[in-house]
Image (cartoon, coloured by chain):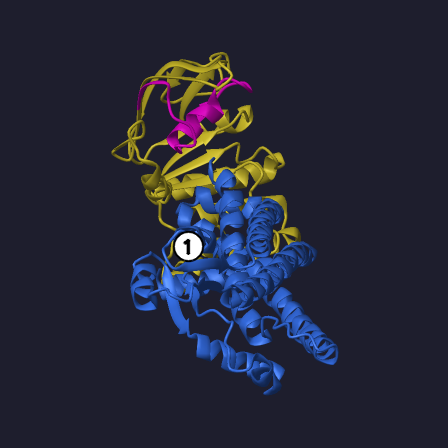
């Protein structure tokens, strides 16, 4: 694209935006609403992901050993399983020390030198969703007394987050398609308002792309304008809510870590602007195509 | 310059518009295309302009076979053909000079070229001093002169006019015709579709007559009808 042409396209696009004042307002409003809804889903999705990650990291498989088990050999066997991220050996002595820490020194006296606690492995897996399979593989090994990972709770949580993620992605896809058609429709009005000009351009010998570019730039501009508006509303809105919610959690002694405004801002910036520009360009491309055929 | 060889064309709905039409127009000619409404005059012009493609036969315009012209090449064909329509087709929000300049801008002419050509053609069509008027501030005849300036600004070898005087009173029509004749004298081939009997008879130039999609007459010093 030659620079001189680019300047011309921008000028034409700007003229289109200004001249079709109310149409511009209408299409940007539609864009903002759509991107706002998208943005809200993105924020929910980010927080769900954040919380899921948090929980996933805490998901631990504890393998209790029989007293006479050969923990060196078992360790090797377990490490041969796929997907093991970390394995820590907790000896009987260590287990007792931890209990003393939690319950106080008195407990050692009460036990009179005996140690009823089993030794154990604390295992973390790369993909917490495979934790059930890992547990099933370890349980029959010789020297294993029992395996514990809060089976039901973990499995339900993963099922829930998977469904939530699928659902929100589906909704986002539907909204994006909706936005595309709304923008295409609005640009169609702009193109329609300028059909006379397009007709003249065609019969004096303008190339198709020469005719197309201003409309595509106009679409991109409308998309970006919508994205900017939606971004500002969502970012400052989230900033405010994040501060409120964090304060509330803190007061109620809940350790819930929400996605930080910085992270949300970064993600929204990428997604909203790319999507806004993309939808705008594609929408106007669709609209202008029909009018180019004489 | 223009050759039609056994050209037939039917509208997409199947109605026949042209049937086996053949004629040849040489460089520098001044030709009227006459006939009643629906005789196929517009179809001939649209074929020349590659708005439509012949169903059979050959259409040759400016050394190009339009049946084989690729879509990408259409704009470059049109840059060599000036067109003038009955309804002028000016942009109401642009001045006379801007309307003419627009035709050069959209074919990516340089700004020095635009500055040179626009006053030149406005001078040819007799609109000096009215460059900055908007179409609604001009009379019908003046608006048609702007359209003609726009058609000529790119120095096309061929000028095609579709009922150029259809919206104008007889006196203004005659002035437009005289202007077209002068443009022809400057070397441009001119083809005019019209049903303005009086003008055709008064000009006494070559006449192609269509009736029901068939070429019924090609008269080199013609009048509108045989009887006239």
- Disc 1, SS: helix
State the residue in front, B8 or B2.
B8
* Image: A107 above or below B96: below
State the residue position of label 1: A134
Q: Chain of mark 1?
A: A
Q: Which chain is yellow?
A: B
| Colour of chain A as rendered | blue
- Numbered disc total: 1
Residue B125 placement, left or right of A15: left
Q: Quadrant of residue A32?
A: bottom right
* Residue drawn 47% across the image and 52% down it: A132
Q: Quadrant of residue B2?
A: top left
Picture coordinates of residue A47, whole percent (x, y): 60, 65
State the residue in front, B213 or B148.
B213
* Residue drawn 56% across the image and 20% down it: B37
- Give the residues drawn in magenta, as a range: B32-58
Residue A271 placement, left or right of A205: right
* Residue drawn 66% across the image and 71% down it: A238
| Residue A285 in sight | yes
* Residue drawn 59% across the image and 67% down it: A228
């Amino acid at each position: 694209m030659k620079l001189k042409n680019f300047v011309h396209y921008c000028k034409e696009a700007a003229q289109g935006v200004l001249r079709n004042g109310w149409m511009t307002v209408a299409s940007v409003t539609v864009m903002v609403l759509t991107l706002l809804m998208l943005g809200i889903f993105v924020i929910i999705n980010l927080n769900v992901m954040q919380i899921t990650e948090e929980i996933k990291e805490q998901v631990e498989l504890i393998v209790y050993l029989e007293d006479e088990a050969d923990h060196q050999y078992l360790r090797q066997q377990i490490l041969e399983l796929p997907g093991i991220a970390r394995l820590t050996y907790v000896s009987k002595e260590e287990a007792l020390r931890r209990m003393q820490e939690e319950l106080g020194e008195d407990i050692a006296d009460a036990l009179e030198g005996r140690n009823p606690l089993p030794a154990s492995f604390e295992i973390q897996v790369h993909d917490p969703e495979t934790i059930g399979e890992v547990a099933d593989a370890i349980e029959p090994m010789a020297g294993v007394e029992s395996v514990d990972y809060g089976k039901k709770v973990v499995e339900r949580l993963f099922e829930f987050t998977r469904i939530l993620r699928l659902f929100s992605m589906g909704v986002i896809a539907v909204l994006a398609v909706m936005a595309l058609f709304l923008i295409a429709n609005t640009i169609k009005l702009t193109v329609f308002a300028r059909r006379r000009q397009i007709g003249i351009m065609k019969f004096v010998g303008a190339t198709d792309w020469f005719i197309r570019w201003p409309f595509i730039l106009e679409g991109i501009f409308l998309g970006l304008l919508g994205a900017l508006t939606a971004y500002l509303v969502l970012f400052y809105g989230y900033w405010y809510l994040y501060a409120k919610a964090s304060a509330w959690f803190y007061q109620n002694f809940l350790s819930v870590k929400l996605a930080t405004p910085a992270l949300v801002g970064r993600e929204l910036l990428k997604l909203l602007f790319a999507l806004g520009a993309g939808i705008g360009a594609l929408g106007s491309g669709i609209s202008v195509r029909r009018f180019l055929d004489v | 310059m223009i050759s039609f060889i056994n050209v037939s064309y039917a509208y997409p709905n199947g109605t026949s518009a042209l049937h086996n039409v053949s004629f040849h127009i040489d460089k520098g000619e001044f030709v009227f295309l006459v006939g009643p409404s629906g005789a196929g005059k517009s179809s001939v012009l649209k074929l020349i302009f590659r708005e439509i493609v012949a169903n059979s036969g050959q259409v040759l315009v400016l050394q190009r076979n339009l049946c084989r012209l690729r879509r990408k090449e259409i704009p470059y064909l049109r840059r060599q053909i000036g067109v003038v329509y009955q309804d002028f087709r000016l942009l109401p929000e642009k001045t006379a000079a801007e309307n003419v300049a627009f035709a050069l801008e959209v074919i990516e002419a340089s700004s020095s070229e635009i500055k040179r050509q626009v006053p030149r053609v406005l001078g040819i069509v007799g609109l000096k001093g009215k460059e900055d008027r908007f179409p609604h501030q001009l009379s019908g005849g003046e608006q048609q002169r702007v359209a003609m300036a726009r058609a000529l600004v790119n120095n096309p070898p061929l000028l095609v006019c579709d009922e150029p005087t259809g919206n104008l009173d007889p006196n203004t029509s005659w002035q437009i015709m005289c202007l077209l004749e002068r443009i022809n004298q400057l070397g441009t081939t001119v083809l005019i579709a019209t049903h303005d009997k009086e003008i055709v008879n008064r000009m006494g130039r070559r006449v192609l007559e269509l009736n029901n999609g068939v070429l019924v007459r090609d008269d080199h010093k013609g009048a509108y009808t045989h009887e006239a």
